[in-house]
Image (cartoon, grey):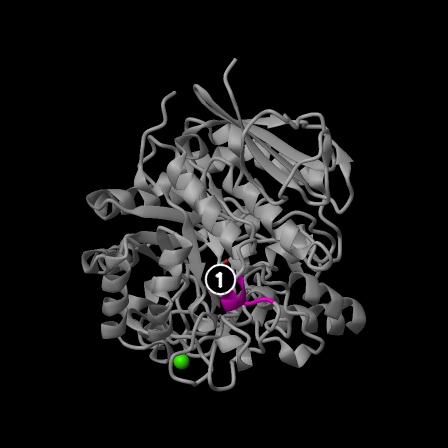
């Protein structure tokens, strides 16, 4: 089937985590004026779309993913005028902007919730999910994603409210048509301001089953996923959102869909479904869960990784559209997790980029990935800021018997703060991020890893990303070509073909620090891009990546 052409399929997106991108006024917190200062950098990189993590009013229990006013800018980030200027200046440079839509829950300081918890009945009572106690305790055994029970007792209403994340993030009641109307009106308001779409936070969790019975016991709490993910009415709600809001604009919509299968993704983002353009499939980032969920030190299994990508590439072919990412603000740094942040740092970062950007789908670069930023390497619990990391530490070390040493190791590998240290702009103090003292420590390797340095080096990771982005813009096969996995059995090489007749690309990536033999390398074919200057016949050097064009037979 011929793929329908769309701007958001041809785009490369870049995620900004505003708090850690660039501070313009020395208070240690990144802000909108800081982003404005760096727009020329983003044009130089060549990206087409910015996805901004939340910039709205928030008490910041979860860095803006707990919103207290959807139509106001967070004081620390600036003003609405700053936002309007940023949007205008982005558009001037041909860069579109999508915002984070966090509507599974609000902050507990949102006026709707403040009204909802009043003792006196009012229209906001039905905006959230309230349940009576069961035998004087929580309504059921469900555990929240950030630890503890998913229920919090409120003395005014003498009931429990439901929160899938922290207790400062009560879940909205999407069954209430008034709630949906409020959200749709807010979305229109932003779209009329000229934004180019939304990344929708945990959007597959907005519909809960009617059945609030106990979940399967996992550790101290019951698992709420089967009751809250891909729930019975989620598609009805998204279709309503599409019909009432989205279909009136030419926008990019991408839904975060944790634990969704390709079959589910087809429902969210099937070309004929009138819901979303695409979902963030995070299956490869969720790999390796164990007894304590993501908190372990299991190495990445390449076979499994390849299997996951292959499945998503194949199953969405012709019926939906993939998103592609190695990381985001909830994940460790890509090069530390999937590559090698020691001896093969630069070459492995380029290999990962090649492997991802040559696949079919819209690539998302997470800020700093384009210079190969690495995990934070924090030594002390006090260095961490993330609500999930801190709660997990307390739960696992204080209650589940995991040792302090083991947990500190897991945090070093998996904490969300690994991706949240300030962007490394230069070798100046605090990596050129702030003139003050940053809200979270900068990574100590900024004198070696920073934008300024890599701008001056022809073979830097940064310049490699610029070339990859430019290639996608120049070669329709990278956007629209069919995907075909090669060497499926190999546990060292990730290889595939892209085909858009008569053009064929072969992508070959060594995921190890060893030399490996590889029969796929064609000496005669012209190389489109590679992270080594030359080639050795039949051999891939550590983390070598080669993309070459095959001439048709
Ligand atoms: C999403 C966000 C994450 C946030 C959570 C709750 O997973 O990406 O950062 O903590 O939703 O909003
Ligand atoms: Ca600031």
- Is 337 in front, or is 110? 337
* Residue 231 appears in the figure: no
Q: Residue 427: x, y in percent?
A: 55, 75
Say whether residue 454 is magenta: yes
Residue at image point 62% right, 49% down: 286
Q: Where is 431 relative to 329, above or below?
A: below
The residue that mark 1 highlights is 455
* Residue sitting nearer the eye, 18 or 157: 18
Q: Residue at x 50, y 65 (%)?
A: 451
Relative height, residue 140 to residue 166 (above, below): above
Q: Is residue 542 above or below residue 169?
A: above
Residue 65 drawn in magenta = no
Please tell me whether the stretch drawn in magenta is mainly helix, strand or loop.
helix
Q: Position of residue 514 (x, y in %)?
A: 78, 43
For the record, the magenta segment spans 449-455
Q: Give the x, y percent position of residue 490.
A: 73, 31
Please state, as top left, top right, bottom left or bottom right, where the N terminus lies in the image.
top left
Mark 1: which secondary structure? Answer: helix
Q: Would you identify the image quadrant in which residue 52 lies?
A: bottom left
Q: Residue at x 42, y 40 (%)?
A: 472
Rendered residue at 23%/67% (across/down): 84
Ligand 2 quarter of the rendering: bottom left
Residue that lies at the very extreme toward the top in this rendered image: 553
Question: Where does residue 297 sit, x and y in percent of width and height?
Answer: 75, 57
Instruction: Using the rendered view, name the quadrant where residue 55 is placed.
Output: bottom left
């Amino acid at each position: 089937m011929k793929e329908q052409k769309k701007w958001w399929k041809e785009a490369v997106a870049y995620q900004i985590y505003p708090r850690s991108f660039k501070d313009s006024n020395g208070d240690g917190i990144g802000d909108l004026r800081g982003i404005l200062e760096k727009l020329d950098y983003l044009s130089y990189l060549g990206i087409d779309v910015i996805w901004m993590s939340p910039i709205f009013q928030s008490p910041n229990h979860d860095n803006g993913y707990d919103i207290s006013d959807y139509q106001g800018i967070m004081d620390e980030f600036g003003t609405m005028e700053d936002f309007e200027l940023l949007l205008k200046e982005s558009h001037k440079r041909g860069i579109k902007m999508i915002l984070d839509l966090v509507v599974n829950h609000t902050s507990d300081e949102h006026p709707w919730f403040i009204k909802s918890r009043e003792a006196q009945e009012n229209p906001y009572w039905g905006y959230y999910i309230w349940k009576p106690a069961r035998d004087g305790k929580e309504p059921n055994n469900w555990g929240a994603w950030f630890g503890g029970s998913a229920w919090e007792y409120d003395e005014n209403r003498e009931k429990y409210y439901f929160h899938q994340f922290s207790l400062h993030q009560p879940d909205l009641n999407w069954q209430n048509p008034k709630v949906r109307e409020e959200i749709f009106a807010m979305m229109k308001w932003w779209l009329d301001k000229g934004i180019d779409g939304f990344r929708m936070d945990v959007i597959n969790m907005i519909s809960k089953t009617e059945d609030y019975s106990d979940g399967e016991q996992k550790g101290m709490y019951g698992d709420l996923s089967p009751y809250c993910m891909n729930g019975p009415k989620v598609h009805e709600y998204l279709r309503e959102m599409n019909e009432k809001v989205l279909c009136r604009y030419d926008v990019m919509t991408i839904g975060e869909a944790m634990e969704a299968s390709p079959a589910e993704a087809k429902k969210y983002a099937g070309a004929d479904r009138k819901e979303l353009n695409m979902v963030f499939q995070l299956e490869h980032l969720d790999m390796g869960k164990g007894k304590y969920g993501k908190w372990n030190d299991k190495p990445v299994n390449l076979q499994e990784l390849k299997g996951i990508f292959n499945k998503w590439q194949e199953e969405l072919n012709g019926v939906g559209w993939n998103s592609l990412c190695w990381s985001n603000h909830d994940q460790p740094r890509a090069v530390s997790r999937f590559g090698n942040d020691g001896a093969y740092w630069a070459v492995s970062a380029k290999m990962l980029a090649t492997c991802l950007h040559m696949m079919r789908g819209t690539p998302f670069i997470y800020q700093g990935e384009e210079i190969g930023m690495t995990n934070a390497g924090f030594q002390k619990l006090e260095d961490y800021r993330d609500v999930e990391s801190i709660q997990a530490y307390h739960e696992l070390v204080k209650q589940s018997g995991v040792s302090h040493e083991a947990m500190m190791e897991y945090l070093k590998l998996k904490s969300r703060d690994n991706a949240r240290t300030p962007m490394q702009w230069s070798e100046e103090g605090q990596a050129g991020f702030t003139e003050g003292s940053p809200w979270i420590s900068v990574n100590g390797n900024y004198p070696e890893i920073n934008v300024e340095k890599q701008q001056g080096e022809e073979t830097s990771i940064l310049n490699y990303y610029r070339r990859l982005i430019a290639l996608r813009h120049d070669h329709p096969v990278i956007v629209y070509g069919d995907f075909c996995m090669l060497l499926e059995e190999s546990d060292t090489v990730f290889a595939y073909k892209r085909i858009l007749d008569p053009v064929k690309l072969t992508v070959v990536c060594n995921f190890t620090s060893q030399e490996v033999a590889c029969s796929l390398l064609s000496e005669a074919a012209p190389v489109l891009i590679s992270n080594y200057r030359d080639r050795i016949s039949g051999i891939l050097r550590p983390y070598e990546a080669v993309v070459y064009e095959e001439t048709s037979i």
